[in-house]
Image (cartoon, rainbow, N blue to C red):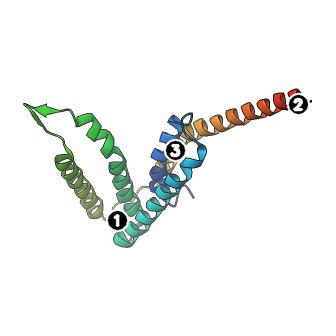
Amino acid sequence: MLKKFPLYPILFSIFPVLSLAGYNIDEISLDVIWRPLLTSLLIGAVLLGFAKWIFRDWGRAALAVSITIVLFFIYGQVYNLLEDVTFGDMSLFRHRTLLPLFGMLLLLALVFVARRGNRSNPSPYWLNLLSIVLLVYPSFQIVANVLQQWSADRALNSSYSQVVE
């Protein structure tokens, strides 16, 4: 399955949610992860299906969706990085300038993907593997925290039952 079907756009779409949850797992409840995770998963799958309908090729569709997802999720980080860049008293990178820049970048990337044609579509194996590797660390953080909380709750219940007896 990893060698034939491009899963990486869908996995790339859930990476930011899992990464943010893994980083902030001590501050959030595990219940709040599900809605954004399912929303990102659904949007990634719908975009992949729509791109497959437009490009009529899984390889080009997956590449186009991956580029779109990456640009979508890095926009805020780039904006925060460039927000304070000024020329004189004028801020150069506001939403009104950065958003069209990202739009043109996305358009150029999609035109490149569309013109690429059926020339040597590489196997999606490596990008699928990369997306799985990206998900390992945040998933490990979340699972480790859940196990740690479960162990603490179990110890607390054990000590509480000893006090009651």
Name the residue tied to disc 3: 18
Three-letter amino acid code of the residue under disc 1: Asn
Please state which of the two labelled residues, at mark 1 or mark 2, is closer to the viewer: 2
Q: Position of residue 73 (x, y in %)?
A: 37, 47
Q: CA distance from mark 3 to mark 1?
A: 34 Å
Q: CA distance from mark 2 to mark 3?
A: 40 Å
Q: CA distance from mark 1 to mark 2?
A: 72 Å
Count neighbours of disc 2 (C-alpha within 10 A) and say few if under 14, some if 14 to 19, many if 20 or more.
Answer: few
Asked where in the image residue 106 lies, by quadrant, the reply is bottom left
Element on which disc 1 rests? loop
> In this view of the protein, which residue sits in the foreground, 56 or 26?
26
Three-letter amino acid code of the residue under disc 3: Leu
Name the residue tied to disc 2: 164
Name the residue tied to disc 1: 118
At 86% from the left and 32% from the top, the residue drawn is 161
Element on which disc 2 rests? helix
At 88% from the left and 30% from the top, the residue drawn is 164
Three-letter amino acid code of the residue under disc 2: Val
Q: Is residue 134 visible?
A: no
